[in-house]
Image: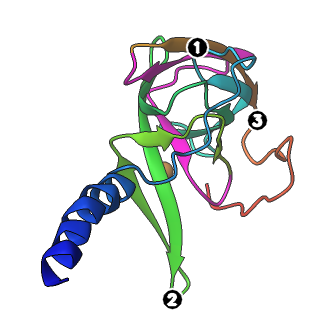
Amino acid sequence: MIRSLFAMMLMAMPIVAVAAVAPAKPAPVEEAWDRTKPRVEGAWVRLAAVPGRPSAGYLGLTGGGQPDRLTGVTAPGARIEMHSMSMANGVMKMARLEGVPIPAGGKVAFAQGGNHLMIFGLAGTPKTLPLTLQFASGAKVTVNAAVQAAGSEAPKPGDHGAH
Ligand SMILES: [Cu+2]
């Protein structure tokens, strides 16, 4: 009896092990959804109120078919950093981001009061600014950001007016 119980346990163990190794897989991205890179929408730049100060850039991202990571943004004649923003005890804090995860099919916003682009060295007041987004996957996406005057309202609600 003891021996057969032991044998049953032995037989049961591999099953348990398999169950532990193969948890429920995350739902696969629908196959019909054939995007190879993230999509970028609604890019706009608000010029600095004071010449020489950095301008701010905002845009929305939708992840492609695979998780990716935004690793940098460039524009001709300017240097761009990705920043996070948070409020602590009424004090606004910005921190430089080295990368921003973009989940497959997920929405990631660079918007006022949150993550944003800081654009240094932008000369003059161009109507548009081509932003090139570089992703860890190797994908590159270039969008034309509309350039708005300093203090102008966002195309979207949610203005915290911090920049
Ligand atoms: Cu900033």
Marks 1,3: beta carbons within 8 A: no
Label 1 secondary element: loop
Q: Amino acid at mark 2?
A: Asn
- Return the x and y of residue 119 as percentages of the image width and height: 49, 33
Marker disc for residue 89: 2
Point out the stretch of residues depicted in magenta. Answer: 112-137
Above or below, 44 against 31 in this view is: below
Residue 53 is at least partly visible in this image: no
- Mark seen at residue 19: none
Name of the residue lying farthest toward the bottom: 89
Which dot, 1 or 3, sits closer to the camera? 1
Amino acid marked by disc 1: Thr
Q: Position of residue 108 (x, y in %)?
A: 63, 44
In the picture, the quarter occupied by the N terminus is bottom left
Which dot marks residue 149? 3
Nearer to us of marks 2 and 3 is 2
CA gap, disc 1 to disc 3?
34 Å
Mark 2 or 1, which is nearer the eye?
Answer: 1
Q: CA distance from mark 2 to mark 1?
A: 42 Å
| Mark 2: secondary structure | loop
